[in-house]
């Protein structure tokens, strides 16, 4: 049996819990973190800025001695970076989208221009505008990477959200711009559009086109190919993989870590250095006892959305976080929701717009209720709460 030095990042507590409708209690996440640590993985990913409970969990896990494993995922925001540092976390994963589709939706300058209101990247956007949003993205990324490393003194990985839909040359340019600041550049197939053949070629070509940075991979399972895509990317030279135990996660879930680790063993005769294979079953058994499973690819359950950042993009572009043209988007409400979830419900579905401050109030109330009751809320339940004056 050959051995392979491969970093394994466990996203079960963060991207896994972002599965629509899923809620892990504080004690459950604490137990999962310790079970995961026993497997010999290299990182446990959390998101402390989501709630006070998440920040407290981070501090507890550090006191438990898991500080070297703990990493915090965060959007490009200096306030979030400072909060993570204050929690005592030493390594962060900064996230920023690199596809033209998501960059166009999120560029602060473009959003303010009347000629682009209501448009998506499919609306024949001039090349000069595309070049502008790409450069704006690189400028913002480098600014925050510099702040995180040089000012905050943190170890940093960069997660290139939706990079499987990014322009290849722009992706190479971004990798080169990031490489002085980061340990790993994590390629994300955010909406699961890769195929095994393309996965190998993509990672291989990026390795041939860049130097000085290690590549990680973070693949979703929308088309049911996350496992094979991950294995092919490892064969092509990726040295870090990010996934969840049980394959749980948004829409049809993430790649299942236990499947990758055992798949490398069975198919390629490769064991990952440092992994305690006997400790994997206790993690997956624990998740199984919780009754948690990912939604099957192509199912209606895989078309549910809870995360506020995603719903905000879906408001403007249905293709932003949904790879299938004929899907029926179902928005639910919980700890991960934003004001955009309520905006989607009242404006897209009910055609009854409310003031922005009302959406913000609803978001705050639902996040509190979801944490207190350890559950999510359906659209009908939100409407009942609204009619009963809970949001007043």
Image (cartoon, rainbow, N blue to C red):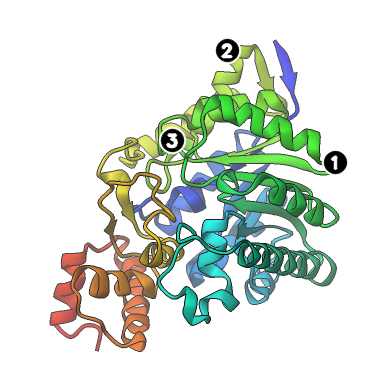
Closer to the camera in the image, 107 or 86: 107
Circle 1 SS class: loop
Q: Is residue 48 above or below residue 248?
A: below
**Residue 246 disc label:** 3
- Quadrant location of the N terminus in the rendered image: top right
**Residue 267 disc label:** 2
From the top left corner, tell me how far across and down residue 256 is, in percent: 49, 33
Cα separation, mark 2 vs mark 1, equals 29 Å
**Residue 371 disc label:** none
Which mark lies nearer to you, 2 or 3? 2
For the point 40% across and 53% down, which residue is it? 319
Q: Residues within 10 Å of mark 1 (few under 14, many from 20)?
A: few
Which mark lies nearer to you, 2 or 1? 1
Give the residue at mark 1. 211
For the point 75% across and 28% down, which residue is it? 5
Q: Can you tell which quarter of the image residue 99 is in?
A: bottom right
For the point 33% across and 46% down, which residue is it? 325
Q: Can you tell which quarter of the image residue 2 is in?
A: top right
């Amino acid at each position: 049996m050959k051995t392979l030095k491969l970093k394994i990042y466990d996203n079960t507590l963060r991207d896994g819990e972002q599965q629509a409708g899923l809620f892990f209690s504080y004690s459950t996440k604490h137990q999962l973190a310790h079970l995961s640590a026993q497997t010999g993985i290299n990182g446990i990913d959390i998101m402390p800025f989501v709630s006070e409970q998440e920040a407290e969990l981070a501090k507890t896990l550090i006191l438990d001695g898991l500080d070297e494993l703990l990493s915090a995922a965060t959007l490009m925001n200096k306030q979030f970076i400072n909060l993570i540092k204050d929690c005592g976390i030493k390594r962060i994963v900064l996230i920023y989208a690199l596809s033209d589709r998501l960059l166009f939706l999120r560029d602060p300058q473009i959003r303010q221009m009347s000629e682009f209101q209501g448009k998506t990247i499919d609306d024949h956007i001039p090349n000069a505008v595309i070049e502008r949003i790409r450069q704006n993205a690189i400028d913002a990324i480098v600014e925050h990477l510099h702040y995180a490393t040089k000012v905050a003194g943190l170890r940093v990985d960069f997660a290139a959200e939706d990079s499987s839909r990014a322009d290849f040359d722009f992706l190479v340019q971004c990798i080169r711009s990031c490489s002085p600041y980061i340990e790993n550049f994590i390629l994300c197939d955010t909406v699961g559009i890769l195929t095994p053949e393309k996965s190998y070629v993509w990672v291989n070509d990026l390795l041939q086109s860049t130097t000085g940075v290690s590549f990680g991979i973070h693949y979703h399972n929308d088309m049911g190919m996350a496992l094979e895509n991950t294995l092919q990317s490892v064969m092509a030279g990726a040295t870090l993989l990010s996934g969840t135990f049980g394959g749980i996660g948004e829409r049809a879930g993430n790649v299942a870590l236990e499947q990758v680790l055992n798949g490398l063993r069975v198919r390629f005769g490769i064991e990952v250095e440092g992994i305690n294979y006997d400790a994997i079953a206790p993690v997956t058994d624990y998740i199984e006892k919780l009754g948690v499973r990912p939604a099957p690819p192509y199912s209606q359950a895989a078309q549910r959305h809870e995360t506020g950042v995603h719903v905000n993009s879906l408001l403007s572009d249905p293709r932003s976080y949904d790879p299938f043209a004929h899907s029926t988007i179902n928005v639910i409400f919980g700890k991960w929701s934003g004001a955009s979830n309520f905006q989607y419900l009242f404006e897209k579905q009910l055609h009854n717009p409310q003031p922005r401050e009302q959406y913000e109030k609803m978001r705050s109330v639902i996040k509190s209720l979801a944490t207190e009751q350890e559950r999510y809320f359906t659209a009908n339940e939100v409407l009942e709460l609204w009619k009963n004056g809970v949001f007043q």
